[in-house]
Image (tube, rainbow, N blue to C red):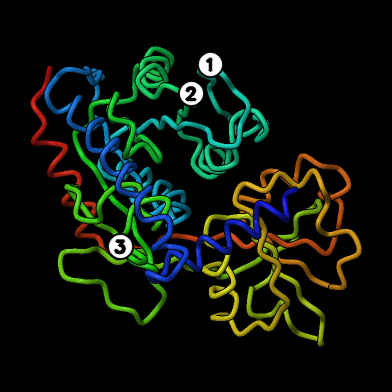
């Protein structure tokens, strides 16, 4: 079933890159999708539906392109940038892939099956106060009640969640741009690529230039960390020494980006893309002909919860760090300081 879902996603992803037969067949449905999305936005803009404003400023990080564009590493970068500027950030998230029905605070020891893999990764990397919930405004209230020291709230992947008022919107994209430019299901866009935003960030490979007015983000990986205790570390470029057979698995929104990072480190490997938020209930490592297996941090938070996987000495995790020009952090802080106090 997971393979069928992944195959369907792969077919749509290919169709979304141009305006071919499948995209054209789905185009009428995209008009309906766009009309409903526009109506929803208008209801909030006109005040017919009310957006809740939290007592702390809210920064929304999201994308209009469906799937992964690098929101999690960007959110980690943003948390550290705000801390460096003297703020105490907190995070709210939908907790996609988790089973929590109500608001739940996320700690480094939470279960990904309950709170979602991306929030758990953020909590483990940063130690930031973080609450997940289906309703982000309610999650924000719970966050501020439990952590009154928080003075700015980051809404992770909440761009289309208009029920939460926001002070700053940051829209991420990657090298796929806007695909064929059409809305779902004929294209990859949740909203028109031209929608308003305060800042645009493009997750680009090394050597690529960002368009005018867009801040470039590069994801860098220097080392690999063994999943099995005691978690040895090795330079990423050294993983292929000795003629070892390498396999790379990625259950993220854009596995190709992870594979490109590994190729950039000079590694040769067998690619095994998995469905986004793959839960590893079916062990994909069993019988895999490889001496070394490289996985993402997002996948690692789930793999560590499964004994048969976490003790496999072949599995190594590749952490990535977002690098963004310092001007973006300065501009975000400047806009935060423009917000009137309550």
For this view, does 308 lie left or right of residue 26? Answer: right
Please report contact status of discs 1 and 2: CB closer than 8 Å, yes or no: yes
Q: Residue at x 47, y 31 (%)?
A: 94
Any part of residue 175 in sight: no
Q: Quadrant of residue 140?
A: top left
Say which element carries label 1. loop
Residue 45 position, x and y percent, is: 14, 28
Between disc 3 and disc 2, the foreground one is 3
Q: Nearer the viewer, residue 134 or 188?
A: 188
Residue 18 position, x and y percent, is: 39, 71
Q: Which mark is residue 102?
A: 1
Between disc 3 and disc 1, the foreground one is 3
Q: Quadrant of residue 100?
A: top right
**According to the image, label 3 marks what residue?**
181
For this view, does 73 lie left or right of residue 271? Answer: left
Q: Residue at x 86, y 51 (%)?
A: 311
Residue 177 position, x and y percent, is: 33, 66
| Crowding at mark 2 (Cα within 10 Å: few <14, some 14-19, many 20+) | many
**According to the image, label 2 marks what residue?**
133
């Amino acid at each position: 079933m997971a393979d069928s879902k992944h195959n369907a996603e792969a077919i749509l992803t290919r169709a979304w890159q141009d305006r071919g037969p499948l995209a054209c067949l789905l185009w009428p449905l995209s008009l309906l999708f766009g009309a409903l999305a526009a109506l929803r936005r208008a209801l909030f803009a006109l005040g017919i539906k009310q957006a809740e404003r939290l007592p702390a400023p809210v920064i929304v990080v999201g994308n209009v392109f469906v799937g992964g564009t690098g929101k999690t590493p960007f959110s980690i970068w943003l948390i550290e940038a705000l801390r460096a500027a003297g703020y105490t950030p907190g995070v709210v998230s939908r907790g996609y892939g988790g089973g929590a029905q109500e608001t739940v605070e996320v700690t480094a020891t939470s279960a990904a099956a309950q709170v979602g893999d991306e929030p758990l990764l953020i909590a483990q990397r940063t130690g930031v106060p973080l609450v997940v919930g289906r309703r982000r405004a309610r999650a924000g209230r719970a966050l501020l009640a439990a952590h009154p020291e928080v003075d700015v709230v980051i809404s992770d992947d909440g761009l289309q969640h208009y029920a939460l008022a926001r002070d700053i919107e940051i829209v991420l994209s990657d090298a796929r741009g806007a695909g064929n430019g059409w809305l779902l299901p004929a294209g990859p866009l949740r909203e028109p690529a031209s929608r308003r935003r305060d800042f645009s960030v493009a997750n680009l490979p090394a050597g690529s230039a960002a368009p005018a007015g867009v801040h470039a983000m590069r994801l860098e990986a220097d080392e690999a960390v063994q999943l099995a205790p005691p978690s040895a570390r090795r330079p990423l470029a050294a993983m292929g020494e000795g003629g070892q057979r390498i396999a790379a698995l990625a259950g993220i929104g854009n596995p190709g980006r992870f594979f490109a990072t590994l190729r950039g480190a000079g590694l040769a490997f067998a690619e095994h893309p998995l469905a986004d938020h793959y839960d590893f209930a079916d062990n994909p490592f069993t019988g895999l002909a490889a001496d070394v297996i490289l996985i993402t941090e997002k996948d690692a938070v789930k793999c560590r919860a499964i004994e048969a996987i976490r003790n496999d000495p072949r599995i190594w995790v590749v952490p990535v760090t977002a690098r963004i020009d310092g001007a973006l952090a300065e501009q975000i802080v400047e806009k935060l300081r423009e917000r009137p106090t309550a």
